[in-house]
Image (tube, helix red, strand yellow):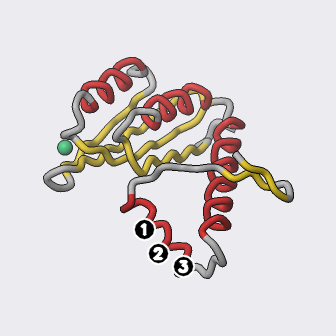
Protein backbone atom coordinates (compact mmCIF):
# COMPACT_ATOMS: atom_id res chain seq x y z
CA UNK A 1 0.00 0.00 0.00
CA UNK A 2 1.21 3.43 -0.90
CA UNK A 3 -0.40 6.65 0.34
CA UNK A 4 -0.44 10.03 -1.33
CA UNK A 5 -2.69 13.04 -0.69
CA UNK A 6 -5.08 11.10 1.55
CA UNK A 7 -5.57 8.34 -0.98
CA UNK A 8 -4.53 4.76 -0.41
CA UNK A 9 -3.51 2.70 -3.38
CA UNK A 10 -4.63 -0.94 -3.32
CA UNK A 11 -4.14 -3.84 -5.69
CA UNK A 12 -7.19 -5.93 -6.55
CA UNK A 13 -7.39 -9.12 -8.61
CA UNK A 14 -10.49 -9.36 -10.80
CA UNK A 15 -11.64 -11.73 -13.53
CA UNK A 16 -10.94 -9.97 -16.84
CA UNK A 17 -14.54 -10.28 -18.07
CA UNK A 18 -15.76 -8.54 -14.92
CA UNK A 19 -13.26 -5.72 -15.38
CA UNK A 20 -14.09 -5.37 -19.09
CA UNK A 21 -17.77 -4.99 -18.30
CA UNK A 22 -17.06 -2.50 -15.55
CA UNK A 23 -14.82 -0.45 -17.88
CA UNK A 24 -17.57 -0.49 -20.52
CA UNK A 25 -20.13 0.85 -18.03
CA UNK A 26 -17.94 3.59 -16.53
CA UNK A 27 -16.84 4.61 -20.04
CA UNK A 28 -20.48 4.97 -21.09
CA UNK A 29 -21.27 6.96 -17.96
CA UNK A 30 -18.47 9.45 -18.50
CA UNK A 31 -16.18 8.65 -15.59
CA UNK A 32 -12.77 10.25 -15.96
CA UNK A 33 -10.98 7.21 -14.56
CA UNK A 34 -11.48 3.63 -13.50
CA UNK A 35 -10.51 4.65 -9.95
CA UNK A 36 -13.39 7.11 -9.77
CA UNK A 37 -15.83 4.42 -10.94
CA UNK A 38 -14.50 1.98 -8.34
CA UNK A 39 -14.80 4.62 -5.59
CA UNK A 40 -18.45 5.18 -6.55
CA UNK A 41 -19.15 1.45 -6.66
CA UNK A 42 -17.66 1.05 -3.16
CA UNK A 43 -19.73 3.99 -1.87
CA UNK A 44 -22.90 2.39 -3.30
CA UNK A 45 -21.97 -0.91 -1.66
CA UNK A 46 -21.53 0.82 1.72
CA UNK A 47 -24.87 2.65 1.41
CA UNK A 48 -26.61 -0.61 0.54
CA UNK A 49 -25.02 -2.39 3.50
CA UNK A 50 -25.86 0.41 5.96
CA UNK A 51 -29.46 0.40 4.71
CA UNK A 52 -29.64 -3.33 5.37
CA UNK A 53 -28.19 -2.81 8.87
CA UNK A 54 -31.04 -0.45 9.76
CA UNK A 55 -33.81 -2.94 8.91
CA UNK A 56 -35.72 -3.91 12.05
CA UNK A 57 -39.22 -5.15 12.91
CA UNK A 58 -41.59 -7.38 10.96
CA UNK A 59 -40.99 -7.29 7.23
CA UNK A 60 -41.79 -9.02 3.98
CA UNK A 61 -38.61 -9.59 2.02
CA UNK A 62 -37.66 -10.98 -1.34
CA UNK A 63 -34.26 -12.13 -2.36
CA UNK A 64 -33.32 -13.01 -5.92
CA UNK A 65 -30.01 -14.30 -7.20
CA UNK A 66 -28.31 -16.19 -9.98
CA UNK A 67 -25.93 -19.05 -9.46
CA UNK A 68 -23.94 -21.49 -11.49
CA UNK A 69 -25.45 -24.90 -10.78
CA UNK A 70 -22.28 -26.66 -11.93
CA UNK A 71 -20.36 -25.04 -9.06
CA UNK A 72 -19.61 -27.98 -6.82
CA UNK A 73 -21.75 -28.20 -3.69
CA UNK A 74 -23.41 -24.82 -4.19
CA UNK A 75 -26.94 -26.14 -4.76
CA UNK A 76 -26.69 -28.16 -1.53
CA UNK A 77 -25.41 -25.15 0.43
CA UNK A 78 -28.29 -22.98 -0.83
CA UNK A 79 -30.74 -25.70 0.21
CA UNK A 80 -29.09 -25.92 3.67
CA UNK A 81 -29.42 -22.15 4.18
CA UNK A 82 -33.10 -22.23 3.22
CA UNK A 83 -33.82 -25.15 5.57
CA UNK A 84 -32.06 -23.28 8.38
CA UNK A 85 -34.53 -20.38 7.92
CA UNK A 86 -37.54 -22.50 7.00
CA UNK A 87 -39.95 -20.86 9.45
CA UNK A 88 -39.50 -17.53 7.59
CA UNK A 89 -39.67 -18.71 3.99
CA UNK A 90 -43.16 -18.40 2.48
CA UNK A 91 -42.38 -19.42 -1.07
CA UNK A 92 -39.51 -19.90 -3.45
CA UNK A 93 -39.11 -20.39 -7.17
CA UNK A 94 -36.33 -21.88 -9.19
CA UNK A 95 -35.87 -21.15 -12.89
CA UNK A 96 -33.29 -22.96 -15.02
CA UNK A 97 -32.05 -20.00 -17.07
CA UNK A 98 -29.63 -21.66 -19.45
CA UNK A 99 -27.15 -24.56 -19.52
CA UNK A 100 -25.21 -23.08 -16.63
CA UNK A 101 -27.22 -20.60 -14.62
CA UNK A 102 -30.14 -20.92 -12.27
CA UNK A 103 -32.29 -18.07 -10.96
CA UNK A 104 -33.97 -18.26 -7.57
CA UNK A 105 -36.53 -16.10 -5.82
CA UNK A 106 -37.22 -16.54 -2.11
CA UNK A 107 -40.05 -14.70 -0.35
CA UNK A 108 -39.68 -14.32 3.41
CA UNK A 109 -41.77 -12.93 6.23
CA UNK A 110 -40.24 -12.23 9.61
CA UNK A 111 -37.96 -10.06 11.69
CA UNK A 112 -35.94 -7.69 9.49
CA UNK A 113 -32.70 -8.76 11.13
CA UNK A 114 -33.40 -12.42 10.33
CA UNK A 115 -34.25 -11.54 6.72
CA UNK A 116 -30.89 -9.75 6.49
CA UNK A 117 -29.15 -12.75 8.04
CA UNK A 118 -30.70 -15.09 5.47
CA UNK A 119 -29.76 -12.73 2.62
CA UNK A 120 -26.18 -12.46 3.86
CA UNK A 121 -25.88 -16.24 4.19
CA UNK A 122 -26.82 -16.56 0.52
CA UNK A 123 -24.65 -13.62 -0.65
CA UNK A 124 -21.58 -15.00 1.05
CA UNK A 125 -21.65 -18.30 -0.86
CA UNK A 126 -19.05 -18.51 -3.59
CA UNK A 127 -20.73 -18.69 -7.02
CA UNK A 128 -23.87 -16.73 -6.06
CA UNK A 129 -24.20 -13.64 -8.28
CA UNK A 130 -26.47 -10.62 -8.75
CA UNK A 131 -28.09 -10.82 -5.34
CA UNK A 132 -30.97 -8.39 -4.81
CA UNK A 133 -32.79 -7.96 -1.52
CA UNK A 134 -35.96 -5.93 -1.13
CA UNK A 135 -38.06 -5.46 1.99
CA UNK A 136 -41.41 -3.87 2.65
CA UNK A 137 -43.49 -3.33 5.77
CA UNK A 138 -46.95 -4.17 4.42
CA UNK A 139 -49.61 -3.19 6.96
CA UNK A 140 -47.56 -3.84 10.06
CA UNK A 141 -46.95 -0.22 11.00
NI1 LIG B 1 -31.74 -24.73 -12.26
- Asked if 97 appears above or below 85 in the picture, the reply is below
**Helix, strand or loop at disc 1?**
helix
Q: Earlier in the sequence, mark 1 or mark 3?
A: 1
Q: Are marks 3 and 2 in contact (CB under 8 Å)?
A: yes
Q: Which residue is mark 2?
A: 24
Q: Is residue 139 left or right of residue 115?
A: right
Quadrant in the rendering for residue 20: bottom left
Q: Residue 28: x, y in percent? A: 53, 81
Quadrant in the rendering for residue 97: bottom left
Q: Are marks 1 and 3 in contact (CB under 8 Å)?
A: no
Q: Nearer the viewer, residue 88 or 27?
A: 27
Q: Are marks 2 and 1 in contact (CB under 8 Å)?
A: yes
Q: Residue 21 has which mark?
A: 1
Q: Is the residue marked by circle 1 packed among few (<14), some (14-19), or many (20+) residues within 10 Å?
A: few
Q: Residue furthest front?
A: 2
Q: Nearer the viewer, residue 69 or 134?
A: 69
Q: Which residue is mark 3?
A: 27
Q: Residue 98 has which mark?
A: none
Q: Residue 1: x, y in percent? A: 69, 45
Amino acid sequence: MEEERGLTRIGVSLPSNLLNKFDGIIGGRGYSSRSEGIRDAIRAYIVEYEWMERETGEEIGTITYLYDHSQRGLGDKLTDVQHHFLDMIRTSSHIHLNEQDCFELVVMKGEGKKIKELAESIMSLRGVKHVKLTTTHGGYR
